[in-house]
């Protein structure tokens, strides 16, 4: 599955969330990550984020697509972190 995660997290927790998400997804810009995950990886991500955030103050949005082929990605302005499929 292709996942896009966007968050608005308090300053004290944002670095931990960013470091955690970098293990699983590609960083796109300040609070946006995207990439392919298995269902079990996605569950780990949701569980890990739930432990990191303060549910009364923070928000994490995620969008799940069955395949990246249905996602049309565009950008206006400078791309902060180009994603490449090359290893």
Image (cartoon, rainbow, N blue to C red):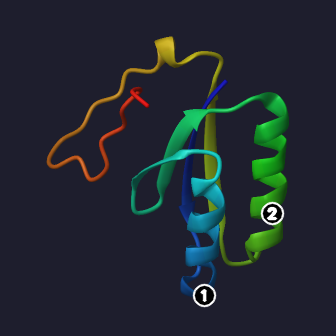
Q: Secondary structure at mark 2?
A: helix
Q: Nearer the viewer, residue 49 or 19?
A: 19
Between the C-alphas of marks 1 and 2, the distance is 15 Å
Residue at the extreme bottom of the image, as rendered:
12
State which quarter of the image contains the N terminus: top right
Q: Position of residue 83 (x, y in %)?
A: 36, 37
Q: Position of residue 53 (x, y in %)?
A: 73, 72
State the residue at coordinates (63%, 44%). 62
| 65 vs 51: above or below | above
The residue identified by callout 2 is: 50
Residue at the extreme left of the image, as rendered:
77
State which quarter of the image contains the C terminus: top left
State the residue at coordinates (48%, 12%). 69
| 84 vs 22: above or below | above
The residue identified by callout 1 is: 12
Q: Quadrant of residue 35?
A: top right
How packed mark 1 is, by other alpha carbons closer than 10 Å (few <14, some 14-19, many 20 or more), is few
| 39 vs 22: above or below | above
Residue at the extreme front of the image, as rendered:
87
How packed mark 2 is, by other alpha carbons closer than 10 Å (few <14, some 14-19, many 20 or more), is some
State the residue at coordinates (56%, 76%). 15
Q: Nearer the viewer, residue 14 or 83?
A: 83
Q: Quadrant of residue 7?
A: bottom right
Q: Position of residue 72 (x, y in %)?
A: 38, 21
């Amino acid at each position: 599955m292709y996942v896009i995660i966007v968050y608005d997290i308090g300053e004290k927790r944002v670095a931990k969330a960013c470091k955690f998400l970098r293990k699983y997804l590609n960083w796109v810009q300040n609070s946006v990550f995207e990439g392919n995950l298995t269902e079990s990886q996605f569950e780990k991500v949701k569980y890990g984020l739930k432990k990191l955030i303060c549910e009364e103050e923070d928000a994490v949005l995620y969008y799940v697509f069955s395949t990246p082929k249905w996602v049309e990605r565009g950008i206006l302005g400078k791309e902060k972190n180009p994603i490449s499929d090359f290893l």
